[in-house]
Amino acid sequence: MVASDNGELLTDTVYQRLAERIFSGELPPGAPLSVPALAVELNVSRSPVRESVQRLIYDGIAVHTPYAGAKVAAMDEESIFDVMRVREVLDGLAAQEATVRIGDEGLRVLAEIVERQSELLEGAPDPQAEAALDLEFHTAIRAASGNAALRDALHRLDARAHLYRSGMWSVQRNREHALAEHRAILSALDAGDAVAAQATATAHVAALTVRMKRWLAATRPTP
Amino acid sequence: MVASDNGELLTDTVYQRLAERIFSGELPPGAPLSVPALAVELNVSRSPVRESVQRLIYDGIAVHTPYAGAKVAAMDEESIFDVMRVREVLDGLAAQEATVRIGDEGLRVLAEIVERQSELLEGAPDPQAEAALDLEFHTAIRAASGNAALRDALHRLDARAHLYRSGMWSVQRNREHALAEHRAILSALDAGDAVAAQATATAHVAALTVRMKRWLAATRPTP
DNA sequence: TTTCCAAGGTCTACATGTAATCCGTCAGAC
DNA sequence: GTCTGACGGATTACATGTAGACCTTGGAAA
């Protein structure tokens, strides 16, 4: 890891690199995560790699069997819908709690994110940026909720969901729907309507799940 | 670790020992978790201790600052109520999902747990056993939900909540209330009423939070 | 042909070595 | 008296060594 000797901890760098490889599909589900091999490849010792793999396991991105090592988690559709089901209630709760705690500054940040999403929708398709903005929007709301336990729980769920939903943003209609729903959530937050905020946020995740289901069905027609 | 060389992984054993020490109050909130010191004390190398401490951090039982080490998490009341707020919606969701998936065997197990709780209530006070049975009840419902993501999220929340709620079971009335609420949840599950199951489970956690709040107020009258 | 078993390689899990970093303390300057 | 800065001790973060567990594979026996 000679090319990135900044102030960060080596373990964090390795973790991010591995996560990128997994999310980009370079390390597909089921791929083995051999600590010695990755250490040689990344030019670091086994210690930070081992620690990073542990973190991937805790985040649900990898699975582990004793004395056999870790491999990238193979999320079946059932599991991903389980995750989304939990996200429904938690993102709803986050929006509800954020309603009372978010300030003008927080609202401004959210509005800016939605604005950027709107601009992005008019330009050339950029699924990567779109997905990043979506995450940013939800993260901002969760941060505004002021509930650390909630934030942590959702972070872990996101890590797993990210394994799947990556490609869905390529569908133009889905991005339009997502933007409209984000606007609805923002509107409820702006109005200070906690009940509506929770309802719209929950509905957003539920709708996202349905669209995901459709996308999966369309992508993988007949096995 | 010469006295417990069973088939388990050393790291798991160390983790459990540390968790026990923390939950029992032997390692109170704020206590430093020095890896070298604990390694000497437990007669193992630093590797399994370091890994265990990492897990404690991921579970929210310990907190970490770079190059400064870890210490037992000092949960302020606000944090614990944040945790309970999340538990409300998640245990509600668990009960709802369990309603459709739980079988006769699962219902029988739950009924038996409630029965044991009832018996325990008549005998001499045993807060330790009572807390264990409560956890068993909730764990059984979460398992019956068949939602792995939900189960994981709740497990982590429990780890943190456990830091606080330990002493509350010593109050007789709290135990009676808990039993009655468990009966209500079981009844809804038995009837197959998913809406009622969710409502009763959520209400149970909410009530538990209120009783916890009272107990904390009574225990720590004036700072 | 199928089954068993032993050898080989790979990896994990655990042990230990080492440089860099942080924190508290205490002497000395102002 | 207060502030500054160097020193000492402890600990982390990372590197590397090693025994044992696992999985394959090849070949011999049934």
Image (cartoon, coloured by chain):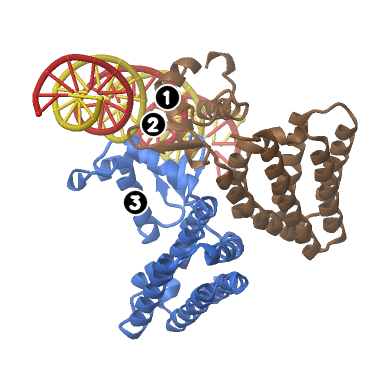
Chain colours: A blue, B brown, C red, D yellow
- The mark closer to the camera, 1 or 3, is 1
N-terminal label among 1 and 2: 1
Closer to the observer: label 2 or label 3?
2
Front residue of B98/B87: it is B87
State the mark number for residue B69: 2
Residue B8 image point, x, y percent: 57, 27
Residue ID at (32%, 35%): A46
The chain carrying label 2 is B
User: Could you say whether the residue bearing mark 1 is in a helix, strand or loop?
Assistant: loop
Relative to B10, residue B164 above or below: below
Q: Which residue is mark 3?
A: A16
Q: Can you tell which mark lies on residue B34?
A: 1
Viewed as shown, does residue A147 lie left or right of A107?
right
A122 to A75, vertically: above or below: below
What distance separates the C-alpha of mark 2 from that of mark 3? 22 Å
Rendered residue at 40%/45% (across/down):
A33
Depth check: A23 or B53 in front?
B53
